[in-house]
Image (cartoon, rainbow, N blue to C red):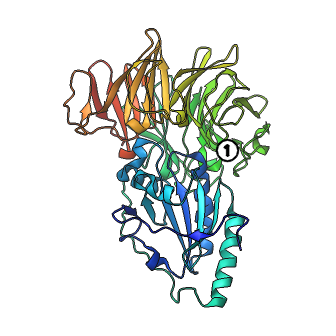
Amino acid sequence: MFEGFFTVTKAPEFPDGFEWINTDEPLSSDRLKGNVVVLDFWTYCCINCMHTLPTLAELEKKYKDRQVVFIGVHSGKFFAEQDADNVRNAVLRYNISHPVVVDRKMQIWQSFGINAWPTIVIIDPCGTVVYKQAGEGRKEEISDVVDVLLEKHSRKGTLARELPTIHSSKKIPSALLSFPGKLAISDVGKIAISDSNHNRILISDLSGKIEHVIGSGHEGLVDGSFDLCKFFRPQGLAWNDKILFVADTENHAIRKIDFETRTVLTVAGTGVQGPWISPGGDGTSTALSSPWDVACKDDIVYVAMAGNHQIWTYDIQTKMVLPFAGTGQENIIDGPARDAQLAQPSGVFVHGDKLYFADSEVSAIRQIDLCTKTVKTLVGHGLFEFGHRDGHMDDALFQHPLGLCVFGETIFVADTYNSAIRTIDLKNNQVLTLVGKTEKNLLCLPDNPECSILPLYEPSDVKYYGDKLYITDTNNHLIRVFDLRTNSLNILNLK
């Protein structure tokens, strides 16, 4: 029936001994017999996989009273993504409710013949693979296949008599912060924190005293007063005098926080994910795609548009939002900004006439000369070249960095999947691990490699202020402070 999509084959069995999330016991073909099974092959770094999750959530609601089971198959790209604890945190962060199997060494990926993230596979109630397609944005296609299978197998009497029951006793941790994403520190020492999974922005002083809570805490795209406005997993932040710009990532929008009027206003984005390639246009009329970070210089807001693999600009005066660097093709190719290729840029920082950005999917740190509008790679090599290696910039390796800042001749990098803070010495062309983990899972600081204080866990951002580094310790749900004078790492006690 669906040979146009895929040549039908018997679905391979899930291997024994694999770790499952969101279910108290492993699932098997026998247990799933009589149900339509939708498999989502994903990896938690991938922006296209992130875009697929809302589609799956909508379909899960549609079929919650039918014989349909959704299962995520997490086939990790990066080393860090092959760790079950890290996958479990990603499942919590993205509020995934369906069962997820951790695909050890990509064995399930290989058995199904998968070659791209994300890929959707649909198995009929008799255990036959009838659909396989890579790419995001296939809600109607998936729904059509499921509807036909339900109708066909209802007539044949091959649907399960009872609805599938999958029990999960998972507990969601409670803390003041929930997966904090990005930071921005004003000239007068006001710290803006994107409390991403609480859908709000916090403003504190350097002691941790919270001065403003911006956002109701509920998901949504609502402008207005600080207590009534809504965000949806906001990430990047940038001060522009007394204004704070926000990359409201899962609303696909840029928001402006005005502290004089105590209001939030959407300045770019429509609330709907934009197309892969877009010419841009008027801010509030142009759909964006997963803006992940922002940085300001003069009247320009630079946007790391992760979903388009580009850097965009928002002009505060003209209110236009436009592509600035990157063709939209995912790769690591330098040259003139509009001809260069980027790969899911997720952190931006302006220093002088240079814009530095963390190009996460190629594990690279790159720069754009704002005068010549040319892109240059400082550290990084390709989509599948990553690791944790210090040394000369030509040889060093990162693993999916998400945040960075620059002070003087030093770039500080939140090397996220290495759970480390690294430095790039632009004067001597050297990369060094400043804060990281040892093989014993203890925190390693310069001259104190056996220090047993809490290590970082997938930090998403780092910012310099007053001889200290402020770090979003994302999976620990904390803000950390590293004192560069004493080499000590502490917790910012928000209160």
Q: Is residue 206 visible?
A: no
Q: Relative to residue 240, is residue 93 depicted above or below?
A: below
- Nearer to the camera, 467 or 67: 67
Against 253, is 332 above or below? Answer: above
| Residue 177, image x, y percentages | 41, 47
Counting from the top left corner in percent of width and height, residue 445 is at 26, 26
Residue 247: give x, y in percent of width and height. Answer: 60, 40
User: In the image, is residue 18 above or below residue 155?
Assistant: above
In the rendered image of this protein, does residue 224 appear above or below residue 142?
above
Q: Where does residue 358 sit, x and y in percent of width and height? A: 53, 30
Residue placed most toward the observer, 473 or 311? 311
- Asked whether 474 or 30 is in front, the reply is 30
Q: Kindly identify the amino acid type of the residue bearing the numbered disc 1.
A: Ser
Residue at position x 76%, y 39% from top? 283
Q: Label 1: how many residues lie within 10 Å, few (<14), some (14-19) or many (20+)?
A: many
Q: Residue furthest top?
A: 427
In the picture of the structure, the residue carrying the numbered disc 1 is 289
Q: Which residue shows up at 60% across the image and 91% down it?
A: 157
Give the side of residue 176 with respect to residue 74, left or right: left
Q: Looking at this view, is 12 or 476 the one in front?
A: 12
* Image quadrant where residue 1 sits: bottom right
